[in-house]
Amino acid sequence: MGQERPVKSYELTGLEVGSIDGSVYIDLPKVYTQPKIPVSKENLLNILDLEKWPYLKEIELKRIDADIEILIGINVPKAMEPWQIVNSQRNGPYAVKTVLGWVVNGPLHSCSSTNETGLISVTANRISMENLKDLLIRQYNHDFPEKDYDEKREMSVEDKLFMSIATSSVELKNGHYHLPLPFRDKDATLPNNYEMAAQRMLNLAKRFKKDSAYANEYATFMEDVLRKGYAEKVPQEQLQMSNGHVWYIPHHGVYHKQKAKLRVVFDCSCSYKGESLNSKLLQGPDLTNPLLGVLLRFRHERIAIMADIEAMYYQVRVLHHHCDFLRFLWWPQGDVNQPLEIYRMNVHLFGAVSSPSIANFALKQTGTDNSERYSSQVIDTIKHSFYVDDCLRSVASVKEAIMLTKDLREACTLGGFTLNKWVSNSGEVLETIPQNYRAPLLKQLNLDCEKPPLERALGIQWNILKDVLTFRVTVKNQAPTRRTILSIVSSIYDPLGFLSPFVLKAKQILQRLCHGKYGWDEIIPMEVMKPWQRWLAEVDQLSRFEVDRCMKPENFGFIKTAELHHFCDASELGYGTVSYLKLTDSSKNVHVTFVLGKARVIPLKRMTVPRLELAAATLAVKVDRMLRKELHMELKDSTFWTDSTVVLKYIHNQTKRFHTYVANRIAVIHNLSQPHQWRYVCSGDNPADDASRGLQIESLLNSTRWLNGPHFLTKENSEWPKIPEDLNCLSSDDVEVKREITTNYLNLQNNATTRIIEHYSSWSKLLRAVAWWLRLKKLLMLRTQRDKALVMDSKWKVEQKGLTPENLDEAEKSIIRYDQQRFFDPELTLLRKGKHIKSDSSIHKLDPILDEGILMIGGRLSKAALP
């Protein structure tokens, strides 16, 4: 009591608290978190409490079934400022009306002799702060779920409804596709939330007054939206619509992380009276092309092109009768001193849950509708070479690239999409593109004498001049905690896994901290500090790491065959795979290139190395399935390499049965590959060894094996490592092999006890029958004895009058003994002799004991120090 006690807490900023009707919002100062607030829902005032104090009957309280998650103190005077007061009577509570609603203070119950405080129910912006520790644990264990590896994904019922609405309603008018808002219910209605939207604009006006640069950028964006026809002012005669088809969307500005450019986002998730626009809309299926696939195909050929769709979402128009669901408030010319005016969007907008699927549907529809006007290469580019609004494509020649860029721009324009920010590693291609359509840094570039700058290809840096992919990470000087380490590691964007052995070293440090249960904001211990600082010092050298963008070397001939080779490995530190593409041209030149690498830490729950090796092998076949789907090239063979003979024996086995973990993964491997595709490689030649153990940056920079694969891949198959001859010789002593159990069955069909048990279907009737049978048995046994006097014993006379509870209890025990004897005879024999049962017994783990001749679970109670 009275002593200070340190507690863990997070500091949050930027929160607002609002009234229940959403009409008022107040900015909160710094807020500090606690695991638990010492107030429960029982402390909330309710209607019954008010009825006990008649002078409070005018107080209007809205019932909210929610936990108390925030306490507002006197450091927010705006929330405490009294607007109206209802004074106390007869020492009862008093009420204060504030900007947020009514607050009632004092004793809640008339019989209470102590002062209790009622709390106002408030609606605040809830921040879901997922426990980072649990998030990491799931990340590490994510490598081992029984995932569906089938490439076909069925749509949900809602996804099918979305596609039905889109396909039946899409129409091309005035050079743009028009699509409706995909409502779950075609007759959806929403309440009038004008007051809430107006209050949000008042808050925005305060921000504008504090930050003039923000205000100017915001106004410029909104004026551009109006100038380009993406939005319009609502006509005077339609302002008073009240048919439930009107919704006012609040908006706010966000900055792009790399571009430092403001974009206005519409808050379609904002709720009013429990409803929001997004809650009414179907999200639709994910129609975005896989990021890995777009990047992989970007590396196919020598000439690369890249472009961006200008304001992609805004190029898809909304059907006119849905536009009033997209109303918003704005000041003329962004002048907050003028009255607010009502506008509405004519296009699908940022912030609507349906917009990503709508925009992707319209883009793919552009390809479908123009499939007869343009080449298959153009249509394939539209359908498969866009990741959201970014287009990445590679072709074999300059002539082909020039033709593709021309036709692609025309085809996309027919769907209302304008391609700009064009980039290419070929000056000849760029010369054919007007300057105002080139990337900003290339618009004024003299292609004859100036070096092209670095560009970002879906987050990866692309050195156009050298045509290589590079990496650069900027690390801020921060205190070394789990949180900052996770932030730094996550900032290394490497979807193709070029750097995965290096990043694995940092992930191992994170896992070590996770296993040690260190807090997220604790300074890491010294034994971890040294390896972390060593790794951090190497991050700056990532800029020296370069990878050829194109998978083929210059002047490489026509590809005759293409093969995939996957290497997998595991250690006590991690596991991973690395995949290579082996190309052979018409002149029999061979080139091996890196395709994809994955390096993962082992799960927190320790596993044997053979199981980890099998997990790596399972990952390899799944990567093969993905690459075959995404590479879009004719592939001859896939070969899988491992240095684990145990895994090879598991895969080639046809007779043994395995325990569940191994059996499930072997089933996946057999489904996605054939045993003859699996080969042995010694550890020294296995590049996946780098993925399972990790590499320092110098080793990664100097490693030719990691990027080019082992040297033998360039040779003929006859010169590859030999396959072991004993792959079918799997020992029965292997811990993963199920033991064969021989069961002796004793035929007891003619046994009288068996006939009695099988005769009755009711447990109670069976107990009574067995009890009478046991009594008869005892009586007959006594009659066979010479001393007839025992038969006349008074005890037996009493028992002959009827069954007792003791008789029924003994009958039950007899049935159990009999049944256990039938199925556990070897175990009973050993236990009666005072011996332990064998480890291969099905009940060995239960530690059985004998009590009155009945097998019972021993458990751990026998090891407890009981009196």
Image (cartoon, rainbow, N blue to C red):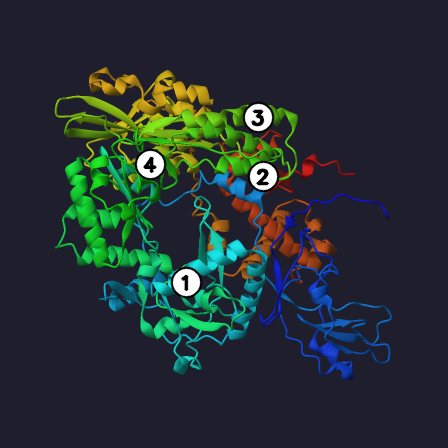
Front label number (3 vs 4): 3
Front label number (1 vs 4): 1
Under mark 2, the amino acid is Arg
Crowd class of label 2 (few under 14; some 14 to 19; many from 20; radius 10 Å): some
Upstream in the sequence, badge 2 or badge 1? 1
Upstream in the sequence, badge 2 or badge 3? 2
Q: Identify the residue under disc 1.
A: 223
Can you give x and y, in whole percent of width and height, for residue 808 in the image?
63, 56
The one nearer the camera, 6 or 300, is: 300
Upstream in the sequence, badge 3 or badge 4? 3
Under mark 4, the amino acid is Val
Front label number (2 vs 1): 1
In contact (CB < 8 Å): disc 2 and disc 1: no
Q: Identify the residue under disc 3.
A: 533
Q: Can residue 76 be seen in this view?
A: yes
Distance between the Cα atoms at labels 2 and 4?
31 Å
Upstream in the sequence, badge 1 or badge 4? 1
**On screen, 834 above or below 413?**
above
Q: In this view, does 634 lie to the left or right of 143?
A: left
Which residue is rendered at x = 47% and y = 71% of the image? 248
Can you give x and y, in whole percent of width and height, for residue 5 in the image?
79, 44
Q: Identify the residue under disc 2.
A: 483
Crowd class of label 3 (few under 14; some 14 to 19; many from 20; radius 10 Å): few
Under mark 3, the amino acid is Gln
The one nearer the camera, 106 or 447, is: 447
Q: Identify the residue under disc 4.
A: 623
Q: In this view, does 372 lie to the left or right of 469?
A: left
Can you give x and y, in whole percent of width and height, for residue 157 in the image?
35, 62
Crowd class of label 4 (few under 14; some 14 to 19; many from 20; radius 10 Å): some
The one nearer the camera, 595 or 221, is: 221
